[in-house]
Image (cartoon, grey):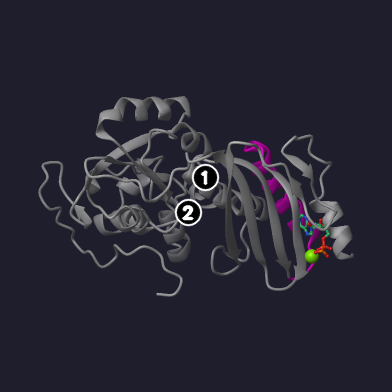
Amino acid sequence: MTEFELIARWFARPAATDERVVLGIGDDCALLAPRPGRELAISTDMLVAGRHFFVDADPESLGWKTLAVNLSDLAAMGARPIAFTLALALPEVDAPWLDGFASGLFACADRFDCALVGGDTTRGPLNLCVTVFGDVATGRALRRDGARAGDDVWVSGRVGDAALALHRLRTGDAALDAALRDALERPMPAIALGLALKGLATSAIDVSDGLAQDLRHILDGSTVGASIEPTALPISQQLASADEQLRLRCALAGGDDYVLCFTAPASRRDDVQRAADASATRVTRLGRIEAEPGLRYVTAAGMPFAFASTDALQGYDHFA
Ligand code: ADP
Ligand code: MG
């Protein structure tokens, strides 16, 4: 099979009838029509076999996740998805694998109205790289530099289940149920919430490397600090029944959550709740932005939170 036959069979779907995409797969470039009064939001994420996923991972879920993790970056900016490209290195043409991968990929693309408009295909160690394009009204993107002392710190969805799933897969000490497996393999990007938070959130980030580390990016970007309550973290029943060290490590430093951590003025709590309800997303208030730099963990009464062990509270770093 040639490279072109592979693209035609698995990736070139009938041209999208979308006024935003002028030209999709097949030419030297895709053509997108920029809309007046809006800024382009662009992000790339690469998934490497053996590093970001197990080589024998379910291809359908992997297809979903490859696009979902990129859409999560658009969500964190409050951007609306438009299109994406896919750069693919494959060790061989494995038809059942490509069937599954393409089906998961397009399920995610259709769910979030994001067209595949191009890419590159080559032989090599399995590597999946998506670049996603979205747009947002000029000057309205949710950035990392807008948090102010007195703002609330919020998180969407639940944290820690993906890390708990990974922990269980690695230790092999318990079977994964569907909910835990989905948390790891089929993350749901918070696109609707990101859109609803525009004009409301003062900053936002998507949680991919662990809540603590990603919140620190907001704190650094905004030159502020924060106090958050570990007991307020939204976690599943399964994670709640893990011992404290595993529980807090998964929830605060686990990664792969693809939820949004954001800040908003305390005066707008009701509006945040309404935005969350409107986008059918759960949100939880974790604490408060403060002028003093650094991230502090406190009890509900505002006293320092006593960790059994803090050595696991570092987020994921590929080069650490
Ligand atoms: P070029 O030689 O100009 O780089 P290619 O021969 O690599 O073009 O690709 C031919 C067409 O197929 C281009 O429009 C390209 O964007 C598209 N394409 C290549 N690989 C993929 C892929 N994995 N998914 C979607 N489109 C792809
Ligand atoms: Mg090429």
Where is mark 1, residue-wise?
178
Viewer-proximal residue among 296 and 149: 149
The amino acid pointed to by label 2 is: Ala
| Residue 85: % across, % down | 70, 54
Q: Secondary structure at mark 2?
A: loop
Query: Would you say 165 lies left or right of 113 here?
Result: left
Q: Secondary structure at mark 1?
A: helix
* Majority secondary structure in the magenta region: helix
The residue under the point 60% across, 44% down is 134
Badge count? 2
Image quadrant where residue 36 sits:
top right
Query: Label 1, label 2: how many angstroms apart (C-alpha)?
Result: 10 Å
The residue under the point 36% across, 57% down is 217
Q: Is residue 93 magenta?
A: yes
| Residue 101: % across, % down | 70, 53
- Quarter of the picture containing the C terminus is bottom left
The amino acid pointed to by label 1 is: Ala
Query: Would you say 154 lies left or right of 186 here?
Result: left
Mark 1 close to ligand 1, CB under 8 Å: no
| Disc 2 packing (10 Å; few <14; some 14–19; many ≥20) | few
Ligand 2 is found in which quarter of the picture?
bottom right
| Residue 153: % across, % down | 29, 42
Viewer-proximal residue among 173 and 222: 222
- Quarter of the picture containing the N terminus is bottom right
- Tell me if I can see residue 155 in this picture: yes
Where is mark 2, residue-wise?
175
Q: Foreground mark, 1 or 2?
A: 1
Up-down: is 193 above or below 165? above
Query: Would you say 59 lies left or right of 96 here?
Result: left
Q: Is residue 86 magenta?
A: no
User: From which residue to which does the magenta span run?
Assistant: 91-113
